[in-house]
Amino acid sequence: MGNLADLLASNMGSKLQGDSFDTVKEDKKKKSSGAKNNEIIPKNQHQLVFTYEKRKGKPVTLVGRFNIPENEKKEVLKLLKKKLACGGAIKEEWIELQGDVKEKIKTVLETDGWKFRK
């Protein structure tokens, strides 16, 4: 009987011969957003939408999809958190803010030049 690695490889259908192994990870974030969504769009051409959720009984307002560089997203988040006096975070191309602040977000971002879907 062979060693343990040979025994496991034969039972699991894997091959351990050769020098090269494919260890490339799929980047799930890039695949889910698609190639088209990675384009950078000026803020006056965005069509931002809102989503409202309750997480653990607390309201969360999501606004997005922001197709802008990461540092600009951070600036928008910082502006919103300061103007609305609430916590928030960036998740992929969405900005999450604590509370039901949809109308306040809309007024702050419209004065900053952002467009919303009707």
Image (spheres, rainbow, N blue to C red):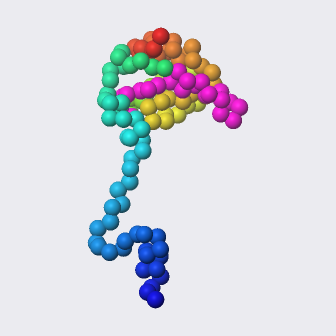
Work out whether residue 114 or residue 28 is closer to the camera in this orientation and state it. Answer: 28
Residue 79 visible, this angle: yes
Work out whether residue 32 or residue 66 is closer to the camera in this orientation and state it. Answer: 32
Work out whether residue 48 or residue 72 is closer to the camera in this orientation and state it. Answer: 48
Q: Would residue 61 appear left or right of 46 to someone viewing this image?
A: right
Q: Is residue 76 magenta?
A: no
Give the extent of the magenta segment: 50-70
Residue 7, how many percent across, how many down? 46, 80
Marker count (numbered): 0
- Taking the view exactly as shown, the residue that stands out farthest to the bottom is 1
Above or below 28: residue 40: above
Above or below 100: residue 10: below
> Which picture quadrant has residue 60?
top right
Residue 80 visible, this angle: no
Q: What residue is drawn where x is 42% and y is 30%?
A: 73
Q: Is residue 54 magenta?
A: yes
Q: What residue is drawn where x is 43% and y is 75%?
A: 10
- Taking the view exactly as shown, the residue that stands out farthest to the left is 19
Q: Would residue 5 appear left or right of 52 to someone viewing this image?
A: left
Residue 112, how many percent across, how many down? 42, 15
Secondary structure of the magenta portion, mostly? strand
Residue 16, how many percent across, how many down? 36, 73
Work out whether residue 49 or residue 101 is closer to the camera in this orientation and state it. Answer: 49
Q: Would residue 56 appear left or right of 73 to someone viewing this image?
A: right
Q: What residue is drawn where x is 60% and y is 19%?
A: 101
> Which picture quadrant has residue 42?
top left
Q: What residue is drawn where x is 40% and y is 35%?
A: 33
Residue 56, how many percent across, how many down? 69, 35
Above or below 6: residue 115: above
